[in-house]
């Protein structure tokens, strides 16, 4: 064992010495030094897990992040011994392990370095709190960029940053505030066009340094637990993202209505006010699917209760709202009021389900109800009990639950003291280990309750805090933001980062939770949020009495806001298809430019542009009075959405930004499906699926996914995938369609709108049958034809 000393006994770091022996057990390799062990597990050609046991024995192999889908793929691998190194090889990578100090170098099959240790594995005693601080340091390659780590409100490229994961109630956070609510210890590296990922599966307080302390060294460490990380080779960044969700799991499809517009306020009460809000949406014909109820719907902020004065008959109210097309989502916090007359408190006390301090006293703290106790969600019995508590709420008609304050947040002291004990599924640990998964497991048990009582309908859960893998059951929002222009940019960056960190179903509080936006700020925020998977206005307007609904800023702004919410509803088939790609393959819904053009160095530090799915490129307007904006377009051709102007990519272009528009582009060759005008999901039977097709002379592919939208028939084959291929040239447009599936959709035909034809057509051919085009087939720059849903090929010439 090599030891390097410094001036303080608290900072002595220990490094492994030479390998004394090794052994292989199936797809596991073990390398033994005098006191430590390195385990290498081959999961696939491109995924390898490394565990380093500083004590000479491994801790329990247990994770709240990994998915049941994490199974080894049949893969050819082997090992060769050399004088100075061991080489483990697969069909995609080579892992070189130094005999004298366990340092790793990972290359591709051609010998190009992907990732390389600097000091590699090391550790020090945590004399103040016990256990060990475990470290890993790596060399930063020339020009290397770093991405990921969840909701960090900073530049997309993390090079030069030092960041921390310790779930924190960061009220009114600003740029570079750290840590925040979520704990996602997963990052990407990109250099020389090669992408890889590292997922450090450790629930203690974790830290990451991307060249902040030493500019050529990347390091990550945890103040407890084990050095346990997964290495993922791309080389494409999107391939890394998909592989990460193979490890941590993919999302289920949400109910389609959860992708509609959602309206929230702290708080809408009494029920008369809720009805007024609902009526106003329908009167003004502004689409909306969801109304949220914040903490004031409860009886003295007691979870799972109703305030009988404000909501005397919640089931009747929810039924009435349902008849108007609204779903109701209610907030539930972890703090249970310490009240001997309160049934939930009595149940938890009788079953001994609440967290305790190290000396056996209950963990008590003040939150909204006053003095509270807190369930230990790391205990599977507690999770089962908690999931059962939702029965009455759901039987009253509630369709979704919003988990808040679950970092956990406690007034005055911030969060739980570290001596609080947790079951941790049978391990008995301190809050140091359980803190970062507390909200994660609360939302997991919440989702289990919803699934249990809403079946066959799909659950909808929002959580403020979580750990890696929460995408399997919850959506998130970015937390208590501020009504400031910079927070439009922060919303964009945070949602992009969450998306590539496994959690695509994310959004921000539109308009800002704290403060009062003016009409221009609110409008620009709505425009951006139109293209975020979760679209919800929320504000702390109980503090000022300020209203933050789409009509609150006057007719000029209402008109534009309404148009963009309507656009959101038209795009629901496209958005749902993109969610299916995310659910099925793990592909992020929001894609920073570096993830779609990683060989273009111009994209590495771009944060203002992103893609939603395969076809839409979006930027936001984040300054008042902005008249134009420079947008970088990746290679290819791009249509400006509002007038079909065609731009060549691989360059920056300047776009006018009048208030009624935002920078929005469609990739040439794309097929973008649209719904006709609706006020809410399931308002009426969709009788026609609109296909907006954008001409390209390059062969392109698109897909449309469809199912019933709110039950689990899709898991039994009740879905369709419709593949489109455009193979056009300068004289002829050709669109081929192949249909796969068993779902019986209601619509009978497609209205096809072809944009950007470079010639003037005279006829169209459907599956070999020729039709003449007439003036009714033409609009400004668009050719329109209506085809039966069963068509297989459309030619326009």
Image (cartoon, rainbow, N blue to C red):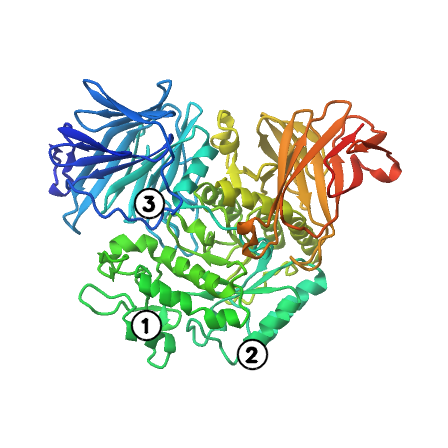
Mark yes or no: residue 796 visible.
Answer: yes
Query: At x 43% / y 72%, what residue is drawn?
Result: 301
Measure how far apart labels 2 and 3 are at the Cα level. Answer: 46 Å
Say whether marks 1 and 3 touch (CB < 8 Å): no
Task: Classify 108 as above or below 289.
Answer: above
Q: Earlier in the sequence, mark 2 or mark 1?
A: 2
- Reading the image, the residue beneath label 3 is 164
Task: Classify 153 as above or below 345.
Answer: above
Q: Earlier in the sequence, mark 1 or mark 3?
A: 3
> Which dot, 2 or 1, sits closer to the camera?
1
Mark yes or no: residue 411 visible.
Answer: no
Q: Nearer the viewer, residue 240 or 123?
A: 240
Measure how far apart labels 1 and 3 are at the Cα level. Answer: 33 Å
Task: Classify 648 as above or below 402.
Answer: above
Say whether marks 2 and 3 touch (CB < 8 Å): no
Q: Looking at the figure, which quarter contains the N terminus?
A: top left
- Reading the image, the residue beneath label 2 is 313
Residue 628: give x, y in percent of width and height. 64, 37
Q: Which mark is residue 348?
A: 1
Residue 755: give x, y in percent of width and height. 74, 34
Q: Mark 1 falls on what kind of element? A: helix
Q: Residues within 10 Å of mark 1 (few under 14, many from 20)?
A: some
Q: Residues within 10 Å of mark 3 (few under 14, many from 20)?
A: many
Left or right, residue 646 beside residue 765: left
Rendered image quadrant of residue 217 = top left
How many marks overall? 3
Residue 248: give x, y in percent of width and height. 39, 45
Left or right, residue 132 beside residue 219: left
Q: Looking at the figure, which quarter contains the C terminus?
A: top right
């Amino acid at each position: 064992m090599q030891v390097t000393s410094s001036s303080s006994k608290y900072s002595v770091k220990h490094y492994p010495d030479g390998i004394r022996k090794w052994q292989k057990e199936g797809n596991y390799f073990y390398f033994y030094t005098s006191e430590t062990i390195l385990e290498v597990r081959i999961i696939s050609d491109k995924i390898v897990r490394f565990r380093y046991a500083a004590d000479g024995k491994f801790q329990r192999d247990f994770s709240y992040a990994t998915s049941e889908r994490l199974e080894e793929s049949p893969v050819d691998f082997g090992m060769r011994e050399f004088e100075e190194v061991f080489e483990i090889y697969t069909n995609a990578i080579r892992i070189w392990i130094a005999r004298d100090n366990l340092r790793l170098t990972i290359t591709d099959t051609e010998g190009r370095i992907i990732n390389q240790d600097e000091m590699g594995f090391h550790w020090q005693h945590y004399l103040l709190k016990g256990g060990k601080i475990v470290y890993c340091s790596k060399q930063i390659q020339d020009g290397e960029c770093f991405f990921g780590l969840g909701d960090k409100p900073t530049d997309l490229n993390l090079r030069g940053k030092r960041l921390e994961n310790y779930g924190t109630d960061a009220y009114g956070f600003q740029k570079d505030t750290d840590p925040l609510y979520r704990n996602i210890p997963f990052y990407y590296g990109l250099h020389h066009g090669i992408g890889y990922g590292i997922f450090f599966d450790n629930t203690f307080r974790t830290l990451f340094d991307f060249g902040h302390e030493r500019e050529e060294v990347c390091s990550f460490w945890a103040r407890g637990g084990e050095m346990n990380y997964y290495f993922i080779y791309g080389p494409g960044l999107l391939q890394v993202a998909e592989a990460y969700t193979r490890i941590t799991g993919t999302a289920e499809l949400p109910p389609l209505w959860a992708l509609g517009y959602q309206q929230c306020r702290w708080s809408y009460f009494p029920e008369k006010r809720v009805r007024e809000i609902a009526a106003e949406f329908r009167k003004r014909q502004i689409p909306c699917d969801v109304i949220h109820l914040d903490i004031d719907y409860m009886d003295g902020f007691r979870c799972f209760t109703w305030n009988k004065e404000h909501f005397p008959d919640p089931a009747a109210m929810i039924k009435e709202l349902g008849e108007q097309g609204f779903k109701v989502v209610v907030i539930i916090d972890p703090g249970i009021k310490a009240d001997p007359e309160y049934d939930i408190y009595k149940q938890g006390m009788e079953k001994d389900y609440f967290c305790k301090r190290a000396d056996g006293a209950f963990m008590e703290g003040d939150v909204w109800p006053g003095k509270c106790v807190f369930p230990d969600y790391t205990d599977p019995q507690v999770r089962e009990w908690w999931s059962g508590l939702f029965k009455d709420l759901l039987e009253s008609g509630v369709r979704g639950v919003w988990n808040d304050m679950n970092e956990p947040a406690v007034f005055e002291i911030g969060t739980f003291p570290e001596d609080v004990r947790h079951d941790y599924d049978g391990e008995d640990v301190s809050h140091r280990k359980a803190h970062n998964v507390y909200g994660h497991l609360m939302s997991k048990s919440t989702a289990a309750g919803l699934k249990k009582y809403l079946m066959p309908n799909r659950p909808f859960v929002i959580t403020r805090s979580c750990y890696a893998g929460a995408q399997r059951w919850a959506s998130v929002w970015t937390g208590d933001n501020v009504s400031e222009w910079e927070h439009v940019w922060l919303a964009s960056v945070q949602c992009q980062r969450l998306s590539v960190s496994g959690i695509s179903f994310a959004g921000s509080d539109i308009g800002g939770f704290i403060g009062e936006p003016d009409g221009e700020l609110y409008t620009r925020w709505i425009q951006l949020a139109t293209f975020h998977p979760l679209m919800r206005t929320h504000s702390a307007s109980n503090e000022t009495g300020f209203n933050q609904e789409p009509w609150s800023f006057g007719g000029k702004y209402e008109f534009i806001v309404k148009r963009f919410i309507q656009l959101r509803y038209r795009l629901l088939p496209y958005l749902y298809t993109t969610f299916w790609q995310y659910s099925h393959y793990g592909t992020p819904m929001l894609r920073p430019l570096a993830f779609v053009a990683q060989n273009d160095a111009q994209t590495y530090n771009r944060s203002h542009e992103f893609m939603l799915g395969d076809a839409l490129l979006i930027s936001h307007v984040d300054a008042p009075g902005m008249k134009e904006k420079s947008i970088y377009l990746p290679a290819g051709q791009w249509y400006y959405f509002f007038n079909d102007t065609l731009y060549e990519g691989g360059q920056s272009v300047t776009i006018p930004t009048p208030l009624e528009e935002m920078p929005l582009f469609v990739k040439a060759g794309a097929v973008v499906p649209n719904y006709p005008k609706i006020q809410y999901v399931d308002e009426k039977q969709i009788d026609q699926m609109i296909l907006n097709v954008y001409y390209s002379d390059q062969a392109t592919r698109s897909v449309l996914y469809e199912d019933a939208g709110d039950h689990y028939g899709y898991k039994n084959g009740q879905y369709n995938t419709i593949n489109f291929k455009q193979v056009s040239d300068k004289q002829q447009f050709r669109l081929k369609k192949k249909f796969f599936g068993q779902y019986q959709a209601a619509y009978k035909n497609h209205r096809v709108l072809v944009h950007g034809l470079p010639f003037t057509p005279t006829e169209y051919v459907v599956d070999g049958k020729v039709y003449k085009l007439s003036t009714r087939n033409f609009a400004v720059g668009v050719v329109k034809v209506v085809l039966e849903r069963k068509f297989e090929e459309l030619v326009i010439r």
